């Protein structure tokens, strides 16, 4: 039986790679994105074909508080049963917290935290009732450290990692799993849109396809979390970070954010 994956932020970047991977494995897709043109292109590229992939598109702006409920209700009204929930949509932005436009950070909280959490809350009871289902929440390696110059973004991803780890513990024995994907710098439009592509962190970005494959496989295996796309030097740095004084870590990250 074909598995159906609901993917947010599916029109580009890692989200589009998730869609390609899922399609290649014979699955169907509910693709959610604000970019209607990108959704049409995704449907054109992956719809039908040798895998006979069925793609149902939902154009929604996840900064709107009612968007997730509308997505859930539309999926139910269409009689679509979701097997995999991939909460991929998210965005960031550089600048001192007190100087950034509050509207932008509020929208970031809405997408990175509230939309992800509410979609999980809507679909999770259905998964548990069926004793099957998988959730993949896209976090970031920055969730593991404080983030001066990107305070809200780093904090929002810290929430995603902690939330996903926590519910995975609650789901033991249910047949349902929750996995957190923690990518490093990745070749997507995110770097340019957030301004991070100008920082030292983005010197060697990973392939979006490689990151998506790591996350998708970890989801299938029901892993707690997976770190992907980090060069060896950054992996070493991340491994010793918990041993360093917090003030030193804060200063180190701040310098990495200089543009």
Image (spheres, rainbow, N blue to C red):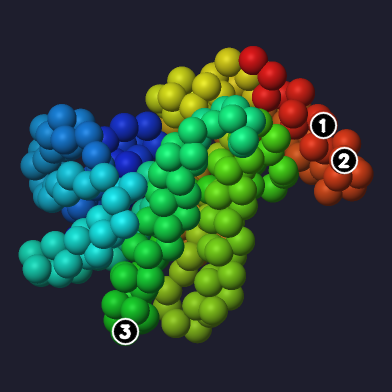
Q: How many residues crowd mark 1 within 10 Å: few (<14), some (14–19), many (20+)?
A: some
Residue sitting at x 58%, y 15%:
198
Q: In this rendered view, identify the residue nearer to me: 82 or 152.
A: 152
Q: Is residue 81 visible?
A: yes
Q: Is residue 210 visible?
A: no
Quadrant for residue 72, please give it.
bottom left
- Nearer to us: label 2 or label 3: 2
Q: In this rendered view, identify the residue nearer to me: 84 or 189.
A: 189
Residue 175: x and y in percent read: 42, 78
- According to the picture, the residue beneath numbered tag 2 turns out to be 247
Q: Are dots 3 and 1 in contact, CB under 8 Å?
A: no
Q: Which mark is residue 129?
A: 3
User: Which secondary structure lies at badge 1?
Assistant: helix
Question: Which image quarter is the C terminus in?
Answer: top right
Q: Is residue 171 above or below residue 204?
A: below
57 to the left or right of 128: left
Q: Are dots 2 and 1 in contact, CB under 8 Å?
A: yes
Quadrant for residue 21, please give it.
top left
Mark 2 and mark 1: span between their CA atoms?
A: 6 Å
Q: In this view, does 211 lie above or below 133?
A: above
Mark 2 and mark 3: span between their CA atoms?
A: 46 Å
Q: In this rendered view, identify the residue nearer to me: 66 or 76.
A: 66
Q: Is residue 216 above or below residue 257?
A: below
- According to the picture, the residue beneath numbered tag 1 turns out to be 251
Residue 17: x and y in percent read: 34, 37
184 to the left or right of 21: right
Q: How many residues crowd mark 2 within 10 Å: few (<14), some (14–19), many (20+)?
A: few
């Amino acid at each position: 039986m074909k598995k159906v994956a609901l993917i947010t932020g599916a029109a580009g970047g890692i989200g589009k790679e998730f869609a390609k991977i899922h399609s290649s494995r014979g699955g169907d897709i509910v693709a959610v994105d604000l970019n209607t043109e990108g959704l049409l292109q995704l449907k054109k590229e992956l719809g039908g074909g040798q895998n006979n992939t069925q793609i149902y598109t939902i154009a929604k702006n996840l900064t709107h508080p009612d968007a997730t409920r509308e997505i859930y209700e539309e999926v139910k009204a269409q009689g679509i049963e979701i097997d995999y929930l991939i909460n991929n949509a998210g965005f960031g932005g550089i600048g001192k917290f007190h100087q950034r436009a509050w509207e932008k950070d509020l929208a970031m909280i809405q997408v990175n935290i509230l939309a992800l959490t509410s979609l999980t809350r809507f679909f999770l009871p259905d998964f548990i009732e069926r004793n099957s289902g998988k959730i993949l929440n896209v976090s970031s390696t920055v969730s593991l450290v404080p983030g001066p110059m990107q305070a809200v973004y780093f904090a929002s991803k810290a929430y995603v990692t902690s939330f996903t780890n926590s519910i995975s513990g609650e789901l033991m024995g249910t047949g349902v799993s929750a996995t957190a994907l923690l990518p490093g710098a990745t070749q997507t439009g995110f770097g340019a849109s957030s301004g991070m592509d100008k920082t030292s962190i983005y010197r060697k970005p990973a392939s979006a396809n490689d990151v998506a494959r790591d996350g998708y496989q970890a989801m299938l295996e029901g892993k707690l979390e997976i770190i992907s796309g980090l060069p060896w030097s950054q992996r070493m740095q991340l491994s010793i970070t918990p041993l360093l004084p917090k003030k030193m870590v804060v200063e180190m990250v701040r310098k990495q954010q200089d543009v």
